[in-house]
Amino acid sequence: MISGFTECIFCKKNAENLTDEHIIPYAMNGTAVLRRATCESCARITGRFEHELFREYWLSNRVNLGMKSRKKKTQPKTVRLPLQSDKARLVEIPVDEVPLPTLMLPNWPAPGILRGLPSTTEYQMTLDHQFYYDIAAMAKLQNTRGVSNRHRFRDQTFARVIAKIAYTDCISKYGIQHYTPFLSDFILSQQVRHDYKHYIGGTDLSRERLFPEPSPQHMFSCAITTIPEMHEDCVYAVSYLNFFSGYGTPVYAVVSGKFDGIPLISGATPNARK
């Protein structure tokens, strides 16, 4: 556990009744914890969007892979998938009947900041997504149940989850002193927005370069580095995240913040965390 916080790491307001915060969510088999780091109000906010991703969108994948759950006794036994004939109508399908994997993930370009775009850039909704599933098994489910593989998925929910992971992972590695976060407001935001794409996106860097020790499930790394396009006397925290990596899913990049007034750590390279 990592401790030493005097106020909530998200809102920077509340200092009482701070709770522990998992760096990699418990639902994704995370074990490392920031001790007494989050106020109860912020914990409720982050808990809601994590619940949406892990217990709704990714439930069947997590259950069928045997991932952790604090509420196994009350864990849903079914998932809701749309009908092929009527995408607005959802039907309940037993979790163990859903093929592994059944994933929908966004295809994002690199974060705007890494492409040298100004922070005032207007970003649009993502319409490009990639689907990952066992073709034969999904075809059988579609024939017997009449469902579609295009399940509900909100990009902003996914973006908030990976922003939170990148933010807490950076704090755990490099501390909070001199750190200016870019995404704490977005993590807590309830509004629909697309400006997060200035700091969150995809990457062309290979898995082999980013993750020297591959894992079939999830891989995360964080390093501080310069961004030549920014022409600033500071270094940036850049994280790379890959979920369900054994299925060839995309790697995402998150620029969670910057450090002012400190030199670049010599030899800082991505360090994979499973």
Image (spheres, rainbow, N blue to C red):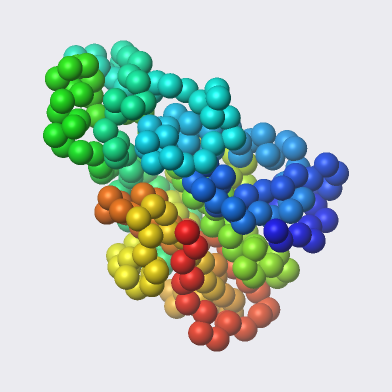
Q: In percent of the image, x 59 and y 76: which residue is there?
A: 234
Depth check: 226 or 273 in front?
273
Q: x, y percentage for residue 133?
A: 23, 39
Answer left or right for 2 relative to 146. Answer: right
Residue 185 appears anywhere in the view: yes
Answer left or right for 163 relative to 142. Answer: right
Q: Is residue 193 above or below residue 10?
A: above
Q: Is residue 258 above or below residue 73?
A: below
Please give the count of numbered marks on the rendered protein: 0
Q: x, y percentage for residue 127?
A: 29, 39
- Locate residue 251: give its quadrant: bottom left
- Which quarter of the rendering shows the N terminus? bottom right
Q: x, y percentage for residue 240?
A: 44, 62
Q: Residue furthest right?
A: 16
Q: In percent of the image, x 34 and y 62: which residue is there?
A: 203
Depth check: 185 or 244 in front?
244
Q: Is residue 182 above or below residue 133?
A: below
Q: In percent of the image, x 36 and y 49: which residue is there?
A: 244
Q: Is residue 195 above or below residue 239?
A: above
Residue 8 appears anywhere in the view: no
Q: x, y percentage for residue 139?
A: 15, 28
